[in-house]
Image (tube, grey):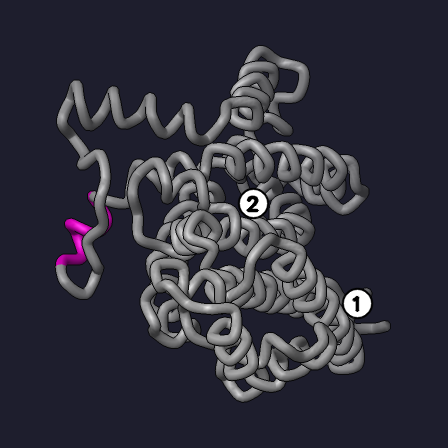
Amino acid sequence: MGRYLLHRLALAIPTLLVVSIVVFVLQKLLPGDAATLMTADADLSADDLTRIRAALGLDKSWPVQYLVWMWGVVQGDFGTSLNTKLPVLEVILDKLPVTFQLASMAIVISVGIGVPLGVIAALKRGSAVDYGVNAAGLSGLSIPPFWFGIMLILAFSVELNWFPASGYVSPAEDFWASLHTMILPAIVLASENIAILMRHTRSAMLGVLKQDYVRTARAKGLFERVVVVRHALRNALIPVITLGAIEFGRLLGGAVLTEQVFTIPGFGKLLVDGVFTRDYPIVQGVVLVAACCYIALNFLADAAYASVNPRIRAR
């Protein structure tokens, strides 16, 4: 198992290098540079701009600039924001916990609803319940998150006044108020994942229920609940564990629209604001950190999969 995890960890290094190169090159292809943006409101001569570019290292070739940037990243220096003049890593670490809370609530809702629905659909295969669950899952995959978020705001914030329409309260400041504020965006973010987890759980359960050991357990006279929970569901959840970790990583990087709709000052909104204001260091840092989080969660999923799958441990 250790060799397997080391192999998976070794694959993460070239992946991060490729991501960093793509982000850096795409940023360089955009019109303008950091010197132009920083001095947009100043009346400077061409010589002044040349001196500023030299001070920022922008007069060097792209490969040299990339290596300088990556050397800083390795040391924990992601650069400085062009707008706030704050260290990029400091800004990211300030916003990341907000998105982490939102993604955590979304994945809890997704697992808490999607897995039971998948089990029920598998046990009731071909029935009206199965068709209804699949139809609901297809709806969850089809509805745009931004539209769903606006509808929830109109229904539960404007009409019923049950939840706030926007804003964020830190759990350290008021835990219950924070949950109350984040419940609607968490539901929006979880809507698609509920359907994904439901369909994968249903498919895995249908495969497991056909296995000989499940028929043997039933032949021994065990209660159906024991057969489903202890024998079928336990093995069916092996691929779902991997999927859940991957989906959690996707939620961290995919909360952009949800945070925009609900005005949540998180990781996704930071990325959107950085793109609109052309704050290149922020955009580069956010994408690279998001890639690191996604790869780390994939590694944890591999570790969890190996720990519950004896065949992986044997190899």
Q: Which residue is mark 2?
A: 229
Q: Mark 1 Cα within 10 Å, few/some/many (few <14, many 20+)?
A: some
Image quadrant where residue 2 sits: bottom right
Q: Which residue is mark 1?
A: 312
User: Image height check: is 31 above or below 172?
Assistant: above
Image: 300 above or below 263: below
Q: Secondary structure at mark 2?
A: helix
Say whether disc 1 or disc 2 marks the residue closer to the N-terminus: 2
Of residues 60 and 184, the one nearer the viewer is: 60
Residue furthest out toward the right: 315
Amino acid type, callout 1: Ile
x and y percent of residue 28 in the render? 64, 61
Say which element carries label 1: helix
Quadrant assignment for the N terminus: bottom right
- Residue at the far bottom in the pictured view: 75
Can residue 231 be seen in the rendering of this structure? Answer: no
Q: Name which residue lies at 15% across and 22% down.
A: 160
